[in-house]
Structure formats: C-alpha cells, structure tokens
Amino acid sequence: MAESLRPSAAGPSAEGGRAARRTLAGRVRNGFVLRRVVRFVVSLAVLLVASFAMMHLIPGDPVRASLGPAAPVELVAARRAALGLDEPILSQLLSYVRNVLSGDFGTSFLSGEPVREIIASRLPNTLGLALIATVVALLVAVPLGMWAAIRTENGRNRGTEVTFTSATGAAVAVPEFLYSIALVTVFAIGLRWFPPAGKAGPVSYILPILSLSISPTAMIARISRVETLRELGSDYVRLARAKRLPAARLYFRHVLPNTLTATLTVGGLLLTALIAGSVLVEYVFAWPGLGLRIVESITQKDYPVAQGVILVYGAIVLVVNLLVDLLLGVLDPTSKLKET
Amino acid sequence: MRHLLRTPAGIAGTLLVALMVILAIAGPLIWGAEAERIDSAAILQGASAAHPLGTDNLGRDILARVLVGGRLSLGLALIATLIGAVAGVLLGALPSVLPRRAARLVTGTVNALVAFPGLLLAMFTAVIAGLGARGAVLGIGAALAPGFARLTQTLAASVAGADYVSVARMLGVSRWRVLTRHVLPNIAEPLILNLTQALGGALIALAGMSFLGLGVQPPSFDWGRLLFDGFGRIYATPAVALGPAAAIALAGIGFNLLGDVLARAASRRATPPGEAAGRPVPEVGELGEPDQDAVLEVRDLTVAFPGGVTPVRGLSLTVAPGEIVGLVGESGSGKSLTASAIGGLVPYPGEVSARRLRLCGADLDELPEQERRKLLGTSLAMVFQDPMASLNPALRIGGQLAEVATVHQGASRTEAFARAVDRLEHVRIPEPAARARQHPHELSGGMRQRAVIAMGLMGEPRLIIADEPTTALDVTVQREILRLLREVTDETGAATLFISHDIAVIGELCHRVVVMYAGRVVEELPVEGLASDAAHPYTRALVASLPDMETDRSRPLASIPGRQPSPAEVPDGCAFADRCELASAKCAELPPLIPYRAGHRVACWEAK
C-alpha cells in the first residue's frame, strides 16, 4: 500500500520557533532585514568604486580622448588638474566618494553644467515613465494570467492555452525599442493620434508607456498563470471549493494572495530591467530623461556625465532590489529568502 | 526533435531559427556585393520596385543590407553568449570546489549581480572600451554571466544532493573530480537549453546597443545599426526602418519560442491520452425508492476519465444519520475519488455519473444551482488528509472559518467571526480568539486539523467526509482527532464517512465498514463482524494483515500477494481474482453485491 504514515514535520517547540521567525519582528531579530541592508550597503560601495574605476580604465587619457587630438596641451593639463587626475589614486577615490556623498557628481566636459543638476532635472521623467509602466503591467498582467489559468485548468480549453503561450512568448521576445518604433510609425506618424516625440502633457506619456509595458505584461502574465495553476491544484482550494464559495471570493481572496510572491519577485526584477529598457524608449521618443542623456554623453565622450548617470542607474537598481526583498520578506510568511 | 514540431510555437520557433542560421551563412555570399554597391543616382529613396525597402545615404539597397547584416548580428550574439556561458558556468561551479567562506562570497556576488540589467553593464563597458562592437559584446557577455552562474549553482546544488554524488564523496573522490565527472555532465542539458534563450537575449541587447549608436560602427553594419540609420528617416520613409526592425523581432521571437519549447520538452511529463470517456458500466439491480431517512444515498456512482480509465465503477452507498461509516481500501481503489464525487469536486476532465445521488433527502442532480451550493456548502463538511495544505497559508484561521457563515448564512462579519471563535473553542483549541487571528503556519498539524473540522461545524453539517484525516499526523495526535470526530458525530447527529487505508483505525472508530477494491464495493458489514464474519477474501486478508505491536505500521498490507489492478486495466470479472486463493472459473464473471446476512452484503461468488 503506497500510503504510508508520514512522519509529522516538527514538535510543538520547533513549530513555535518557526512561527516567531515568520513575523516581521521575528525577521528583524532573525537578522533578515539587517543582512539585506548590509548587502545593499556593500553593493553600493562596490558600485561607487566601479564608477570611479570607469574613468581610470579608459585607455589613455580621458580628458585627451574627450577633447580630441587638436586640443591645446595647456587646456588638457588644466582640465586634468581641475579633475584631480594627477593626484595619487587613493586620495582621488576618497575625494570622489566624499563628493558623491555630498551630492557633487562633477561637471559636464561639454556644457559645464553640474552633473547633479542634469540628474535632478531628468531623473523624475525617467522614474515616472518606469513606475507607471510597471503599475500598468502588473494591473493588466496579473488578472490576465489568472484568467488564463482558470480557463486552462487541468488541460481544458487547449486552444486558449496555445494562443496564450504563443502570444505571450512572442510578446516577451520583442524588445521595447521595436514596440516604440512600431507605435510611433502607426499612431504618431501614420494616424497622428499622439505626438511622435517629446514630453508635452499626459497624452505624450501613452506611447512610451505602452512600449515599455508590453513585454513585462506578457512576462508577468505567464508567471501569474503558472502560479495560479499551481495554487488551483492545492488542497486549500479544494476545501474552499467544497465550501462552495462564490467564484470571486475563491479566486481573489484565496488564490490571488498566494500567487503574488512569485509575481512580485519577477515584477521587481522587471522594474530594474524596465529602467534600463527606458533608455532605448527615451531615445526613440526623445524623452527628456536620463536615458537620452547617457546615450549622448557616451557618444560625445562626456565622461563625468556618463559616470554620474550610470552611478544613479546602478543605485536605483540596488534600491529597487532591496525594497522588493524587504517587501517579500514581510508579505510572504513562508519565504525562503530569509535564509539567504 | 519530433516534439519540436508538435506545437505551432515549436514549428514557428524552429523555422525562424533555421531561417536565421541559413541567412547568417548564405546571406553575405548571395547579397554581399549588392549590399555594398553604391548608387549615387538612388540616394535616400523610399520603397520602390527596384528597392523594396528603399536605399540608404549612399544609394545602397536596404533589403540586401538587412539580409547581409544578419551574419554580424548573429555572430556577435553568439560570441557574447559564449563569453557569458563560460564565465557563468565557471563562476557558478566555483563555490562547490572552494572553501566555505569563499564559496559564500562568490554566491553572494552572483546573487547581487543577477539582478543587474545587462544594458547598464554593456554601457559601462562601452564607456571604457570605446564605442564599437567589442565593448558591446564584452558588456553583454558580462551581463549574461551571472544568470548562467545562478543556473549552474541551482542545478549543481540539486545534483550535489543526489545519492551518487554522496557516494562518490564518501569514497574520497576529490571535489574537482566530483564536479567534472558527476556534477557538470548531469547539468549540461538544462544549461545548453538556456543557451538558446540567452542567444536571443544577446541578439536583442546588441541590436539595442547598435540602435543607440553605441554598438557596431560604420562601415560595419548589423541589424541594430541599420535600424539606427533608418530611424532618422522614419518620418519621411518609414519603410527603411521596417526591414531591420522586422529582422530583429523575428530573430528574437524565434530564439525565444525555440528555447521555450526545448525547455518544456525537457521537463515534459507523460500527457494523458485525450480520448472519449471510459467504457460503460453495466447497470445492476433495481433502483428502488429513495431512502428518505438517509443522509447520503449513492446508487451506481461512476467516475470516468478520458482514455478508458474508470477509477470508480458503479459504487452504491447509503449512510444513515449519526452513523460513522468507514470506507477502506488500498490507494487507487477509488475511495478518495468517491469522496470528491459526492462533494462535486472531481477535477476536469473526470466525468461523474450516478443513477442516484441524494444528500439530506435532496437529489443533487435536480436541485437548482443556488440551493445545491448552499446545501453542499453548509450540510457537507470535508476534512482532507494534509492539514498543512488544506488551510490557505495567506489567510487568518478565523477568516477562513467565518466566510462559510457570511457566504451561506448571511451573517455579518462580526457575527461570523464570533461563531468562528466559538467553533474553534468547541474543537478544544486553546485560546480560540487569539488562534483565530493567526495564520495556519502558526498552528501545529493537529491543531490545524481541528481548525478544519471546526470549519465544517460552521454550517449545520449532516455529513462529514473525512478523507484520511489522520494519515499525515503524529500517532498521538491521530487519537485526539479520531476522538474529536466521534464526539462531533455524537453531538451534532451528523453522519461521518471516514475514508482510510488503515483498517485498524476504521475498526476502532466506525459503526459500519465498506470495503472498496478497484473502484467497487466488495463488502459491506457491521464493524462487530469485521474480525470474525468477513466473507470476502479481500476483507479477510485485510483483517489478517492487521498490525500488532511488533508490526511496522507504515506497511500494513504487505502480506497480500500481488497488486491491485490500475484503473485502466481492471478485468471484466472479479478484480481480486488474480490475488485470490479461492478464485474459480466463475470469477471471470462480475460478482454482484448481494445480501449475505442482516446488514451485511458481499460481492463474491465464493462467499457462502
């Protein structure tokens, strides 16, 4: 007989200990939050050193590379002195860290603008785009994935399943810059419904946000479906069905909360990917964000701007990852994250 | 290879990737000259018959350039992927040969890097290495490495736990050798599968870099660079951006679909055959008048699955109020499906049919949907095997109980919660008000099973179906749950259908025993007669195998030779005949379940 007695998982004391660790306070005591914050600080330090090293890893003289071979020797020397490039490397690193922490990211080689001001004026435009796109993706994808899961549970409606997986598989694979080009061509140049470029009022947000959110929507919808399917097969859903709960209650109260952990993990990762993807979308729509600026600075060898903007992008990614981890640690009572 | 071509996605992916590979090999050979031919008479043209996608600023044909540019796009993507894969596998395998602290450092670094977007890394290297394909390829390769490292780690960790690796370790095989001889060969397949998708990702990322003007530089050109050139003219002649954009999109889709299908094929389980429902079960005996007093009356219940699988075949069962009926049988005998069928919970594509299915005097097939839901939701309580799994981990205990009252009985939230606390107290959960506010993981297994029983008591249960409710619990906790079930039955006057494979537990708890074998009831008798009066050879064998103090309780039926036939291969005659000492030629014919003594029925030709 296959059904053998399963040994019970743990005695009462072990149960109690585990329960304590799963509360928020328990997590703090357990060092989960502290470990995450330490990891964040260490990563941030590595990022700082990397962005500092970037300037020094450029083959030859960055100032000469930036100003071109025709620039007079005196100008190059003066710039080098102003940047402190002739001092010992360690003191350069220290003063770089000190400057960054006090909000001084240097000045543009080309325009002489402080990099801090460039970032301050452009960052909100980039973040706005990325955040709205993430929210749109989550709001559309989670219900879409649930719907597909409920329709295709236990292999019924094969047609829906094939359509869903092929469509989302294709949508995930197309990069955001192609969506932007397609949308611009059709809706801005062809139909003239939306402005083709620039940021002017709420209407100008629509095409960039669409371009940014299609791939993540497809991705999250797939995960939402897989997660929902898994939960639908569980015993607690069977019991909830035995209780004859209304469909809305069954799916939204019982199933949805249990699918959110995995969905939000991916959602968080997608947000960081989306911030990077926004570089391309900003480029297509000439969106006045950081992305457009970093492309310009790299092609024009405006190194202080490139350095500052890459640092900011990296920091955003780290902050998002930290927030997602902490959020999941609090939300998910049985998360395995806490072990790492 | 065959499974690739079974789905539309697989066919599309395979075709697209094959097309890309052919294009990369043959494209420059065929259209190379055309792509470089400068025509000063045809500068910056739109689409025309001679140039379907227009011409560029030197009058070169853009279609030809797209067909040629694929080689560079694919080639660079391949290089970047290989860089990422080699670096990643090394990085991922490192922790298994390093000392503990160093291993943790590497793991931590990989975990931190995995979340870092590739495009940012690629831009970082582009700044250092200068504009051009080299910087972009290096950056994208570096960006792919953490993903491969994480995959290698996860896979290696799962293989490292396998018995053959433990054995190799115990035999003193060196860590490096364990890695190269035992671990890597076993994780090669998923890694190679992942290459396909990584290649698609690298191709897209490189196209993105070139599109931003940070990747491939003229006079070289890949699809991204062609898109960069075309994009500037998109207002005047949109066609010039169309070619490279379509090429990038198709390549991305192709690699992604192929990777998807390969990954799924690798983890494919056997799919059930999708044929029509199982063979019909002969109807036996008169249906007669419905038993008005019975809590549950089932006549000729059949559960069939596609492909001729019929796990429950013509089962009849009657349960009177206050009665505890034990349904006993081996796993696969159909007892749990019987419970699901009574509760209307058989999952698709199972089909339930019965000549009669009455609960609390109402015919479930004839009841309007709304009343049926209410009846099943309040009069039928179900308790499943694993209390760890049958409570929703995300919701508080009290809320899960209370919703029965709010949904079916129109109670307010406060009333429902108060009743939930009362019910929890009733099943002797200490501090019920505090427990009601806790999540399931904060309760022990036995406590959770009590909570599930309390949930069944929220309505006015007439029938409790308990499907192996003690199997997952400690032996001491088992007794308490059994006692609780008996008390609940006594107090509420509800009947209990107690399903178990353990005939000892059944003998202790139940009034009446129903024995199932291969989807049928083979014997039905009062519990007092179980030890002495059992007439069916299978029941007798079950009783004979009853464990005593010295028996290993986890294998209660080890002494019956042979195996129960699976639902797909049940013979037409008596299903037990193969294992039966008394079997005769008559057993090729199906024995009906007929009265044997008072309150005792048996389905066996040899029962005298």
Image: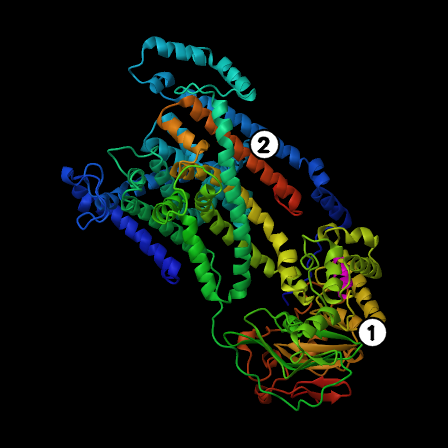
Residue B502 included in the magenta stretch of the image: no
- Please give the residue where the numbered disc 1 appears in the rendered image: B493
> Residue placed at 32% from the left, 56% from the top?
B15
Q: Is residue A203 left or right of residue A19?
A: left
Residue B450 included in the magenta stretch of the image: yes
Q: Is residue B509 left or right of residue B345?
A: right
| Mark 2 Cα-neighbour bin, 10 Å: few <14, some 14–19, many ≥20 | some
Across and down, in percent, residue B35 comes to 19, 42
Q: Is residue B527 left or right of residue A81?
A: right
Q: Amino acid at mark 2?
A: Arg
Marked residue chain, label 2:
A
A127 up-or-down from B250: above or below: above
| Mark 1 Cα-neighbour bin, 10 Å: few <14, some 14–19, many ≥20 | some
- Please give the residue where the numbered disc 2 appears in the rendered image: A39
Marked residue chain, label 1:
B
Identify the secondary structure beneath mark 1: loop
Boundaries of the magenta span: B448-456
> Residue B329 is drawn in which quadrant?
bottom right
Across and down, in percent, residue B335 comes to 66, 73
